[in-house]
Amino acid sequence: MDLNEIVDIAVVGARNDLAQLGTSDAVIAGGTWLFSEPQPGIRRLFDITGLGWEPVTVETSGLELAATCTVERVSALSRELPPDWIAAPLLHQCCTALLASYKIWGSATVGGNLCLSFPAGAMISLATALDATVTIWRADGSDRSVAITEFVTGAATNVLETGDVVRSVFLPAAALRARTAFRKIALAPLGRSGAVLVGRLDLPTDGGAFALAVTGSTTRPLSLRFDTVPTPDALDAALDDIPDDVWHEDAHGAPDWRKAVSRVLAHEIRQELS
Ligand SMILES: Cc1cc2nc3c(=O)[nH]c(=O)nc-3n(C[C@H](O)[C@H](O)[C@H](O)COP(=O)(O)OP(=O)(O)OC[C@H]3O[C@@H](n4cnc5c(N)ncnc54)[C@H](O)[C@@H]3O)c2cc1C
């Protein structure tokens, strides 16, 4: 849609340009959400794709995705990553949890998805499952790294302050070497995710721990941690510990439904990774 109140679009060429960001400005990356609804109060857009960040950097320590890396590129990585990173299919699986046309896939970015911080944020599911760290360029010129589970604080809320920009997300190699199991459910076959759960069983040489990412069904992403694959009772106890007000409510699912289906999916994942 046309955003009639926008008076300027600046293409950002250097980090210093971001110092101008104020409360009536917005960063634009893919623009798939920004142009999908009115943006009252926003006068200027700062296009960060002009910074020319390398979308993907593969290192022995892990995988760095620039904030401007597209969902389409993330999906393609499932076929390109080193063979010992057996979690690679998860990248594509999480992309499929984004309800979107191919046009959205081609433009939507990892950073835009994280910054919206919607419960149905598919890149949030991926990042939570693989213990990602988010690097933020802070308005004061410093950098800050936070775990994804700290970055998102609630439904559409996060730790970003005025002028902060997400630079990248880092997925550690140990998590990429792990076995994973993915489940998504929605009220309609092509509906927005009501729950996205991902289990991860680390290699014995990486500690052998089990982590369960609970996303989509909760207002913020959760990572339930166990030393090894939990017993059914231990898994139930961890799910019971999730406070009632953390189960999300919107048109895509009632909290009691999300809680119930998350439990079913969690047990399926536990069995698959046992
Ligand atoms: C048809 C349709 C279906 C969708 N389905 C889903 C879905 O299933 N799940 C979901 O979560 N979303 C969904 N969305 C919303 C959105 O398209 C995605 O979340 C997408 O990943 C946003 O990325 P973007 O690059 O287009 O963000 P933009 O629209 O460019 O920006 C989104 C927001 O993030 C801010 N921002 C972007 N990049 C940065 C950065 N690096 N640092 C700081 N702030 C930044 C912007 O200022 C803006 O507030 C959907 C949208 C449409 C139109």
Image: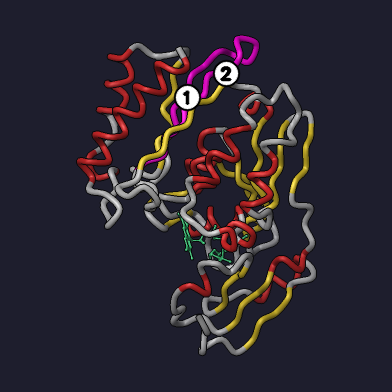
What's the residue at 61%, 70% (across, down)?
Answer: 28
CA separation, marks 1 and 2? Answer: 8 Å
Write the residue at 74% across / 72% down.
12
Identify the image quadrant of the C terminus. Answer: top left
The residue beneath circle 2 is: 202
Q: Position of residue 121 (x, y in %)?
A: 47, 50
Q: Nearer the viewer, residue 79 or 174?
A: 79
Q: Is residue 106 left or right of residue 226?
A: right
- Determine crowd level at label 1: few under 14, some 14-19, many 20+ residues with C-alpha closer than 10 A: many
Q: Position of residue 127 (x, y in %)?
A: 55, 40
Contact between labelled residues 2 and 1, with CB atoms less than 8 Å apart: yes
- Residue 193, x across and y down, in percent: 39, 47
Badge 2, how many Cα within 10 Å: few under 14, some, many 20+? many
Secondary structure at badge 1 equals: strand
Image: 4 above or below 28: below
Tell how many labels.
Answer: 2
Specify the label residue 192 is tagged with.
Answer: none
Can you tell which quarter of the image residue 260 is in? top left
Q: Quadrant of residue 67?
A: bottom right
Identify the coloring: secondary structure
- Tell me where the magenta segment starts and ends, as one range: 195-213
Say which residue label 1 marks.
211
Is 92 drawn above or below residue 27 in the view shown? Answer: above
User: Residue 153: percent from the left, percent from the top?
Assistant: 42, 50
Label 2 sits on a secondary structure element that is loop
On whether residue 199 falls in the magenta region, the answer is: yes
Does residue 272 show up magenta in the picture?
Answer: no
Q: Nearer the viewer, residue 107 or 116?
A: 107
